[in-house]
Image (spheres, helix red, strand yellow):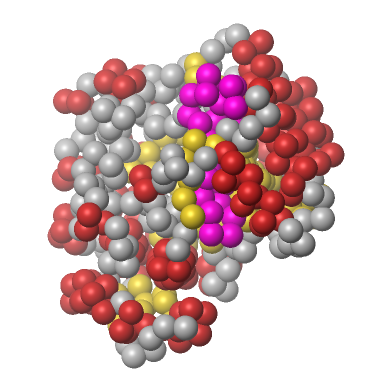
Amino acid sequence: MLGSVSLDLLRKYDKPGPRYTSYPTAPLFSADYDAKKFEIDLIRNNDENTSPISLYLHIPFCDTLCYFCGCTTFVTSDRTRIEDYLLLLKKEIAKAAFYIGRHRPVVQMHWGGGTPSYLTPNQILDLTSFLRQRFTFAGDAEFSVEIDPRGLTREHLQAFQAGGVNRISIGVQDFDERVQRAVHRIQPEELTRQAMQFARELGIPSINVDLIYGLPLQTVETFQRTLEKVVALDPERIAVFNFAYVPWMKPHQKLLHPEDLPSAETKLHLLKQTIETFTGAGYVYIGMDHFARPEDEMAAAQAEKKLHRNFQGYSTRAGADLFAFGLSSISHFGSVYAQNHKTMPEYRRAVEEGRFPTAVGYRMGKDDQIRNYVIMRVMCDLEVVKADVEEKFGILFDEYFDSSLSELKEFVRDGLVRHTIEKITVEREGRMFLRNIAMCFDAYLKTMRRENVFSKTV
């Protein structure tokens, strides 16, 4: 169990920084990396490659607009528009599958959005069948999907379960009705309970609940009630995200009333109580915004140093190349990052012309790969063994990261990190500041504007 959380340290390290779902981070991706380069890299990556793969599908449609949302989404009730998108998505998948082949096992697949459960049960079954015809799925593949309890039926979950889904992530955000009205997401508690009951009855073994702290009208008292209700629901995993108010990037957030947002001090209290409540209830604090039951695969993966981090957050399937399909989705394989177009006209034009819908990307150099490895070890393993880095990349760790280790001294003084000759270890309280600790090893931050680009770290 994590002890009492220090508000002084939360205040000290509350500054803008990357979430490190990638390194280098997405703002560094360039339009110089285009569809032609992506196709060349895809061919090279799959030439006699038998390593496992992970698939991501972006389903951008929603029934209503949540004012807090930072994802690429479209609100529509036009089912023909959804069918049209699914046809484009299949074309993109089929083109990539031609190069990837069936010889590489799929060990993980995630459907995100938007709202994947906004598809009809028949669309879910059809899309799943389409994928299984083009890829070979491992018998123990993890197949997860994001669920909105509003509009969800048992038939939806039956379709997902029939297609192989064994993990669902349920968006809750906050159970308080005033907060729900303020963010335009009215979701009675009973709907969430019903969705979890459907999943349990169908034998879906793992449920994650998503919450957000920092939403309008949240108070320490009301959010504590939400936290206690989540504990009573007993999900296997919980993710609690820091709300990023970025109306200059997401114009619909202007529909929120800024005066209703919690103060910076209140947000720190919300984070403090979140960590203390969930660890007090027996959850393992994985780090940042994730919690898991001790017996859950995620907790076991972290203990065994098999945890991985990608654009979907923490993952238990390390070593898999990620191929992502749909609007705004990001692939990562070998030394390449590639992101699809974010607008429908551009995405449609590329797919209909037989091109990959690549908008921007990045080819990592050696320094990028070294720092990526170290940052991911901080984020996932909570320690960096210097000899492992030296052996893997042929460097002298202390010499290579001299300036980084100087920056790390402050975290050592604050009791958040332990630094010895052999390794760097994140202490228990340091798990709240993984982003800040990782920033010490980021070569690009000194030349980047952080404000209006990255969210606050806590």
**Residue drawn 22% across and 47% down?**
449
**Residue drawn 38% across and 19% down?**
184
The answer to which of 24 and 150 lies nearer the viewer is 24
- Residue 413 is one of the magenta-drawn residues: no
Which picture quadrant has residue 92?
top right
Q: Position of residue 451 (x, y in %)?
A: 21, 43
The answer to which of 321 and 59 lies nearer the viewer is 321
Residues rendered magenta in the picture:
326-350
154 is higher (above) or lower (below) than 271: above
* Residue 237 visible to an observer of this rendering: no
357 is higher (above) or lower (below) than 167: above
Q: Position of residue 223 (x, y in %)?
A: 32, 39
Q: Position of residue 454 (x, y in %)?
A: 29, 45
Q: Is residue 200 left or right of residue 162?
A: left
- Residue 345 is one of the magenta-drawn residues: yes
Residue at the bottom extreme, as displayed: 421
**Residue drawn 37% across and 83% down?**
397
Residue at the right extreme, as displayed: 133
Q: Is residue 332 left or right of residue 279?
A: right
Which picture quadrant has residue 299?
bottom right
405 is higher (above) or lower (below) than 360: below
Q: Is residue 383 left or right of residue 209?
A: left
The answer to which of 417 and 133 lies nearer the viewer is 133
Q: How many marks?
A: 0
Split into 4 quadrants, where in the image is the N terminus?
Answer: bottom left
Q: Position of residue 103 (x, y in %)?
A: 82, 55
